[in-house]
Every structure is written in structure tokens, then in C-alpha cells.
Amino acid sequence: MTYYIHAKKFFLPNTTEKGGYLEVTDDGKFGSFFPEDEKPAGKIVDYSDKMIAPGLVDTHIHGLLGHDVMDNDWDKINDMSKGLLEAGVTSWLPTTLTASREQLNDVCKTIGDNYKKAEGAKIQGIYFEGPFFTEEHKGAQNPKYFTDPDADEFAEWQESAHGMIRKIAIAPERKGAVEFTKAVASDTVAVALGHSSATFEQAKACVEAGASVFTHTYNGMSGLSHHQPGMVGAAMTMNWVDDELICDGHHVLAPAAETLIDKKTPEHIALITDCMRAGLMPDGDYVLGELPVIVEGGTAKLKSVPHNLAGSILLLKDAIKNVVDWNIATDEEAIIMGSYVPAKSCKIADDCGAIYPGRDADFIVLNSDMSLSETYLDGESRYQA
């Protein structure tokens, strides 16, 4: 049955409307938008004290609810997809970790064969974080599997994934990085740069070859100095590239996040979580890949020295709230950074990240303080806070 949402604010693609009515058709799609003074005839679902935004898009997430994508268990990945609705996420990219060629191929097969069966947030692709990284900035990635970029290897994974790999991260200083980027970057695959000690010039060479994303900017990359701009300098100054950013208050402090947002503009900042299996779980001992992790005080860190951050336990609904609470973004900018830009950065913006007529009615209901009230998928309410 077609119905109309009434709310105090709607975050639409090109405007933020105060008041009005958004049509949701009987087949679970977005329909037309009507201004406040043109109340349509039909069923009205009233959220007059709340805001309506597109469902959030998490394009860099490893785990949730005690599960990890690398467990290579479809039931667990499906549980993650359902749990993500609690985070306001309606589309996502299951994210791998550095592992053996065979392990990664098996994960590709599992997701490629089953992704259409996801019962919660929709799997719009796969993000390969590794294994083409640099040991100095390994983070929580296992360096024993690091190797140089190989387009043939990527093609094998992509075939197993039925074309679902949408993003792969590499270190620009690895041998063959530019050639790999030229071979792999396309209208459907984004090459990201991260876990790297690259110079500004090495990063620039990969961007000019087609790389278009920087992986969790600031984290796991060579820093910015006045004589050596490094990866951070490249992420800040390269035109048209998008920068992932973890806004949990631990990976990147608010002033640094503000600097990047101001320089790049919100249209090029993709809020991500990098969440590991302890998301929506209590503090304690966990494993990321093959590495022991301790979760406490809002962080996940490797147990081994030097206790690197090992992903996060951030939920995307909290990331959009944080940037507003820190007074470094407006609510409109926060929504753009949590929905449209992540989708654009992974070449999936035709399928998610914005409220357009004819698209699946995947959206969230927000309170005035940007906290999540409700999550809808295909026009049906699937989570209430």
C-alpha cells in the first residue's frame, strides 16, 4: 500500500526540505516529494518532529556482532547485514583483510554466490583491504601475506566474486602499483590507496593512473610535513579523489577531521567505520584476522606491542552524529558524508546513497540531535531504537 511520510526535514539529493511529504510506493520504492502545503490524499506516516535521510552506506566494515567477513560463513555475514540496520546502514561492502590468495578467493565465492540473499542491509559489493600493503604501516593487517599488486590475481578474485569487488586498496610504493591501477580501475572498480609509506609523488602517480580513494585517511599512511607531504598531503590536495575518514574520536581527533573536511569539502569525505567483530558487542578479547585484539574504552587495539589500533567498534550512525556534535559539519553535510559520498567513492551511487524516485525506499528516521530513531528497508520499518 502506498503511503506518505510527513517529517520536519528531508535530506534530498539537491536540497534539504523543511516539512513536506515523501511518497513510498506499494512496491517499496521512493515516489514523489510534495511540499508542506500540498498534502497528498492517502495514508500518512507522521514523523513531524523528526528528520528523514537516505540509509547510510558503510563501505569499509570488517565485522559486527562477534562475526568477521573473513570467517567465510554466509550465515554470519547475513547476521551482520541484519545487525547493520541498528546502525542506520542499509547498504554496505563486506571488507576483507590481508590473507592468503586462497582464503580471499573462498570469501569471494561465498559472498558472490549469496549476496542477493542478505536479509538486512544490502550487499552492494566487496572491499578488498589488502594484501598489497607495506609493513611499516601494516596496522592490524598480517604482513606475512603482503605482496606486490597482481592484476591476474585480482581477475581471479573478481571472477569468483561474480564481479562484486568494487574497491581494492594498495600501497603506491609497491612494485607495479601504477600498472595495476591502470589495469584495474574502471567505472565499476575503485582503486584505493592506504597502509602505505609512499611519498607524495608515488601517491600522485597512482591517482593519475586512476586511483580515486584514500583508505582511512591519516591512519596507516605516511604523514604530512612541510618538506614531505606524504600520503596525507596527497589525500588532502589531489583533485576529485575521495577520502575515507573514521570519526570515532580515537582514530582521528576532531581538529584533524575538521581540517580534512574543510580542505576536501564534504562532497569528497566518505565516513566509514572500519568496524571489527566487536561492534555491538561487550568489551573483551577478540581476534582480527589471525591477530589477538583487546577491546576496551571505545577502542580495539592489538595485544602485541606497539598496540596498533585494530579497526574500530564504531557504528556509522554514531559517526554522523559525532561530526555534528563536534561542530565540524552541519547535519546536511554529515548525511552526505555518510550516504552519498561513500556510495560514489565505490562506484555504487546508482544503487544507493540518495533518495530518488524509483529507487528502493531505504531510509532512516533521525531525531533532532542526529541520533537514530528508525531504519526502513524497501519501505518497511525494520529497526526501532
Image (cartoon, rainbow, N blue to C red):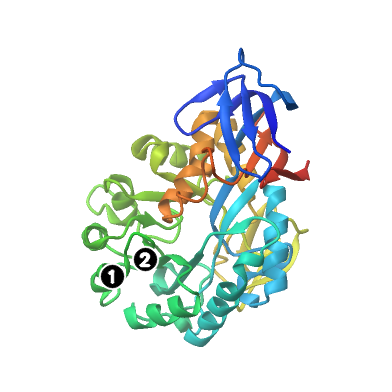
Visible in this render: residue 210? yes
Task: Describe residue 321's horizontal placement relative to residue 78 as left or right.
Answer: left
**Residue 231 falls in which quadrant of the image?**
bottom left
Tell me the quarter of the image containing the C terminus.
Answer: top right
Percent x, y of residue 146: 42, 80
List x then y, in percent, for residue 1. Answer: 74, 38
Label 2 Cα neighbours within 10 Å, binned few <14 / some 14-19 / many ≥20: many
Q: Which mark is residue 382?
A: none
Residue 158 at what x, y percent from top left? 44, 75
Choose between 181 and 201: the one closer to the eye: 181
Which residue lies at the image location 59% right of the left edge and 75% below the top edge? 113
**Residue at image location 53% in from the left, 36% down from the top:** 334
Along the viewing direction, whichever of 70 and 137 lies nearer the viewer = 70
State the residue in front, 201 or 351. 351
Q: Position of residue 196 (x, y in %)?
A: 36, 66
In the image, taking residue 12 as reference, residue 76 lies left or right, namely right
Image height of 190 relative to 162, above or below: above
Q: Label for residue 196? A: 2
Q: Identify the element where label 1 is drawn.
A: loop
Q: Which residue is mark 1?
A: 173
Marks 1 & 2, CB-CB < 8 Å contact:
yes
Q: Is residue 375 left or right of residue 327?
A: right
On the picture, is 330 further left or further right than 135?
right
Q: Amino acid at mark 1?
A: Glu
Amino acid type at circle 2 is Ser
Q: Is residue 302 above or below residue 250?
A: below
